[in-house]
Image (tube, rainbow, N blue to C red):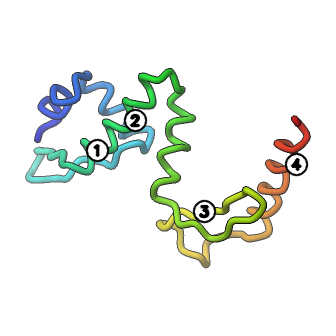
């Protein structure tokens, strides 16, 4: 379906669709020709999920984080904390020490608010 059809199907404006693509909430349209775009079932499902969260009053940045977890691969779970990895990132590109430092800071911040 075209951008206009996709927007109409979701009852949103084409601008909202472009926003979701720019924010990496939705993947870019599939190219079907010189300038024709096509949106498929993958786009519809992700957009519907985003809009459901948005209608619940969640902010776009929070929704983006929640939606990213669907694609992540669980690595380890310990004491109620789960580590997930984005499958699009090659393991050799992960700076383990930097990641562990950020995780430790986030956990300490969370625990200190108790």
x 26%, y 23%: residue: 12
Residue furthest to the bottom in view is 92
Instruction: Assess whether mark 1 and mark 2 are in contact (beta carbons under 8 angstroms).
Output: no
Instruction: Assess whether mark 3 and mark 1 are in contact (beta carbons under 8 angstroms).
Output: no
Residue furthest to the right in view is 112
Q: Which mark is residue 60?
A: none
Q: Earlier in the sequence, mark 2 or mark 3?
A: 2
Q: CA distance from mark 4 to mark 1?
A: 36 Å
At mark 3, the secondary structure is strand
Q: CA distance from mark 1 to mark 3?
A: 22 Å
Q: Earlier in the sequence, mark 4 or mark 1?
A: 1
Image coordinates of residue 112 in percent, x first then y, are: 91, 40
Q: Earlier in the sequence, mark 2 or mark 4?
A: 2
Residue furthest to the front in view is 79
x 25%, y 22%: residue: 13
Q: Earlier in the sequence, mark 3 or mark 4?
A: 3
Q: CA distance from mark 3 to mark 4?
A: 18 Å
User: Mark 1: few, some, or many residues within 10 Å (few <14, many ≥20)?
Assistant: few
Asked if residue 62 is positioned above or below residue 31 in the image, the reply reads above
x 50%, y 50%: residue: 68
At mark 4, the secondary structure is helix
Image coordinates of residue 101 in percent, x first then y, are: 83, 60
Q: CA distance from mark 2 to mark 3?
A: 20 Å
Q: Which mark is residue 108?
A: 4
Q: Which mark is residue 45?
A: 1
Image coordinates of residue 102 in percent, x first then y, are: 78, 55
Residue assigned mark 2:
50
Q: CA distance from mark 2 to mark 4?
A: 30 Å
- Tell which of 99 and 108 is nearer to you: 108
The quadrant in which the C terminus is found is top right
Instruction: Assess whether mark 4 and mark 3 are in contact (beta carbons under 8 angstroms).
Output: no
């Amino acid at each position: 379906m075209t951008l206009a059809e996709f927007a109409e199907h979701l009852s949103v404006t084409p601008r909202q669709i472009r926003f979701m693509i720019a924010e990496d909430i939705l993947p870019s349209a599939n190219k079907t020709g010189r300038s024709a775009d096509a949106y498929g079932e993958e786009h519809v499902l992700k957009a519907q999920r985003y809009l459901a969260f948005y209608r619940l009053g969640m902010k776009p940045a929070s929704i983006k984080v929640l939606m990213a977890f669907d694609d992540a691969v669980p690595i380890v779970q310990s004491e109620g904390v789960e580590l997930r990895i984005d499958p699009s990132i090659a393991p050799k590109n992960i700076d383990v020490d930097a990641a562990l430092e950020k995780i430790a800071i986030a956990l300490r911040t969370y625990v200190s608010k108790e």
